[in-house]
Image (cartoon, rainbow, N blue to C red):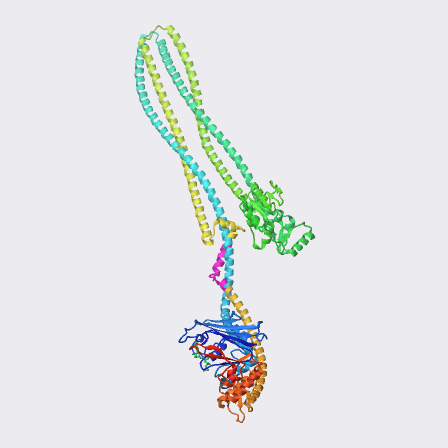
Amino acid sequence: MFLKNIKMHGFKSFADKIEIELDKKITGIVGPNGSGKSNVVDAVRWVLGEQSVKSLRGDGSMTDVIFSGSSTRNALNVASVTLVFDNSDNYLPLAFSEISIRRRLYKDGTNEYYINNERCRLKDINDLLMDSGFAKESLNIISQGQVDQIILSKSSERRTIIEEAAGVLKYKRRKEESLRKLEKTHANMERVNDVINELEIQIGPLKEQKEKLEIYEKVVSELENLEVSLVASDITNINYQYKEKKKELDVVNEELLKIMTTTTTNEVKIEEFKNNIDKIDKEINEKQKELLDITSLVEKTNSQKNIILERQKYVVEDQKLHDNLVFLKEKKSKITNEIETNRFEIDLKEKELKEVLEEFNKENNDIQKNKQLKSNVESELYKKNRELIYHKNKIDNLRDTIDNNSSLPSSVRNILNNPKLVGIHNVIGKLIEVKEEYSIAIATALGQSANNIVVDNENIAKDAINYLKENNIGRATFFPLNIIKPKGIENNLIDMVKGIEGYLDVASNLVKYDQKYHGIISNQLGNVIIAKDVNSANRISKIINYRYRVVTLDGELFHVGGSITGGKVQNNRNIISDKYELESLIREYSNIELEIKKLEEKINEIDHYLKVHEDKHYLINKNKITIEEYIKNKLNITLDLEDNLNDALLEMKSIDNIMNKSLSEEEEKVINEYYEVVKKRDFISNELNELLRNKNNLNDTLDEFEFVFKKENSLYNSKSNIAKELEIEINRCDVKLDNLLMILNETYNTTYENATLKYKLEIPEKEARSKISRLKKELNEIGVVNLASKDEYDRISTRYNFLITQKEDLYNAENTLLEIIKEMDVIMVKKLTESFSVINKNFQETFKELFRGGNAELLLTDPSNILETGIEIVACPPGKSLKSITLLSGGEKTFTAISLLFAILKSRPVPFSILDEVEAALDESNVSAFCQYLDKFKDQTQFILITHKKKTMEYMDTLYGVTMQESGVSKLVSVKLEEIKE
Ligand code: ATP
């Protein structure tokens, strides 16, 4: 190993690029004062990593080493120095036969380091040179005036020389590094301890708050589950009531409209009747006046007739016959009148009877029709009552089946109901929640698997099977949670069918279940596709090449491979659809109840109607019988009168034959006139009676209409009351719905749709309500909670645990470092002790040889502490007494220092050494001794000497001269040795 080449450019006075070729022997660098020789030494130190500007003879910043310009040259921006080493003996631990180290410095202060032209860090150079013997701490480079420093430095500073020579710098650095790390570790540990203490204060209360929060969250979640599901169920019920009431209201409103129309028509009719009665009243008045007139006429003609008759008594001979004839004539006229009046009356009564009969038949028909209607409604009611009983039984049976698992095979039931078997969950069908519309499809997809029992593990399955065997109660299939693995359909297949019309989803996505059953549910439903209908299922099966089962909403099943199962299942009962069937039965049951209520109301209405019309019918009938009796009676009277008339006519004829014409024509005329007027009077009287009867009839009909009108009015009022009540109830439902929806929205931030999808009320409503109020009370008791406490606790405890681990790590690191330090100390003590003793021995020898006598030695200031001891130099040149080395002459100090230098070189040879005018203070004979000594070492160490001494130059193998021909810029010239030696 030796220094082959020094290349410089821009370093101090070396503005131009120069190269100093060196060989293994002694090279001298000579030149006039200030020419730049020492700058060469600085350059070498600088490359080897010198960071002290002072050591490089500067007093400002490191950039001072860049060529700062001269009277003729401008300053440069960069200084660069390269050392090239021959490393063919692998002295430096790099697998290169030649190693170059370069340092470059820019004006802005940027340093660059290179090893073999590869950019590296200063540390890499330090590591490479560590314990090489030419690191910056070594004595192999001694700058101008520095040689005395060895002697003059403090004993504590001097130990560095021994350390470097002993090769312990590496260990010392490592120890220092370890101590630094130890200190840092210790400080870290204290910091960690402080934080741990701080965290311990916080963690206790936080844990309590977190536990309180956990209870609170549990209660809140339970409350949310219950309240949302209850509210959703309430909404469903109230909404159903709301719709039903609306329907009822529509019906009542329609009825009201009908009643109103009839009432208006009746009102018009009543008015009409009243008008007619007024008209008849007028006619009656007129007739009464007419009757009055005619009655006075009758009286007048009667008195005329009486006068004639009185007069005739004196004229007629046979007075008796005459009287009799007059009497008979009167009788004839009277009977004729009576007969005509009766006939007239009978005609009128027959007319009236006809009308009454029409009315009677109409009422009769109406009553019969309503009786028929009532019997139809009654048989409908009977049917509905039977349906109600049928539904009730069905509901009871189904409820019983659900509660007691009766639809499950007895073996499965036995397993589920056996409390001794632990680890049994339930049958698959009961572990899932499915919407009603998918229930048939999911039940079909599961098939018999719906009854398969989910258990914790295979051992529990084995126990359950043994139980079945021992008790001989059939077979069952078990799904151990720890074994059954999920199944699925490849994503690319799903992507292919996703867009197909009628594709709904994979079956496992359409059911809700506890996540711990994911494996089993996916195993059974993860590889089944649900489609809307047969056509879509067919298309999907084809696309997926019949690789997975496809099931339709109606339960048609497309098997793997392409076969299809369909049709109506005879007994399609299964544990999945049972609860939906129960719900639908309950719905139907209450619908039937409603229908029954309506039918009963209808029957009541018909009864009421029948009662009114039967009463009316009775009255009409009564009237009819009266009229009939009257006519019959009148007819009999008339017949008797006709008989009487005939008798009178016969008697009159026989008297007429006996008597001559005894009545004059005038008498005859008066008598006839009288009977004409009487006839007329009776006729008018009959007409008046007829008018009165008509009026009575009209009044009766009017009463009837008014009765119906009043009845309809009261029906209208009662119906409008019902309508009002219904409106109030509808309104109440509306308000309730709004309130419930508001609870969902504001308290739980969800919608009714979401609520029904996610939450299902699994306990009776009453129980749910009392549970909700209990949970709310519990929340009140819990009071205020710190919502951030969980995160905070997790964060703090994670940090706490982390710090505890870190503390342990730091503790371990501290121990490791202490071990390393101990090891370093052991090695250093050994190496230093050995090295010191060798150097001390060598020093004594070289001193004696160079001084040609005398004594010198190195003393440890604290031999008990070799690691920190200082080193004293004791020197006694020949013939002199032992004095403090500071009292030695300049030459003696230099020579002592050189002795030590050589002693070190002897104990640990270095590859090269640069000595800048170290021999300047020596006299000629000592220079010779020094040079001879150099000569002795030149095989093991390459020397580069800067000197002014001719004597020294004589010992050089190669000489370089440094000049400053151009002012301020150093140049290198070669010097012929012969010239020196001459
Ligand atoms: P001596 O024989 O007196 O010890 P020397 O040959 O060793 O002298 P050096 O000390 O190496 O001389 O060189 C000093 C010269 O280098 C001075 O002239 C100084 O001006 C010059 N110098 C130092 N730093 C720079 C710099 N950054 N730029 C230019 N010149 C510089």
Q: Position of residue 64 (x, y in %)?
A: 43, 76
Ligand 1's quadrant is bottom left
Reply above or below: 39 against 925. Answer: above
Question: Is residue 862 among what the camera can see?
Answer: no
Q: Nearer the viewer, residue 721 or 682?
A: 721
Q: Quadrant of residue 860?
A: bottom right
Quadrant into which the N terminus falls: bottom right
709 to 537, vertically: above or below: above
> Which region is colored magenta?
771-793
Taking depth in this image into account, of 228 and 610 the one nearest to the observer is 228
Residue located at (40% from left, 18% from top): 342
Q: Position of residue 885 (x, y in %)?
A: 50, 89
Q: Is residue 851 left or right of residue 685?
A: right
Task: Answer above or below: position of 493 versus 890.
Answer: above
Magenta segment, principal secondary structure?
Answer: helix
Query: Along the horizontal axis of the image, is 471 left or right of 671?
Result: right
Give percent across and percent down for residue 200: 51, 69
**Residue 786 shown in magenta:** yes
Q: Toward which corner of the image does residue 941 lie, by quadrant?
A: bottom right
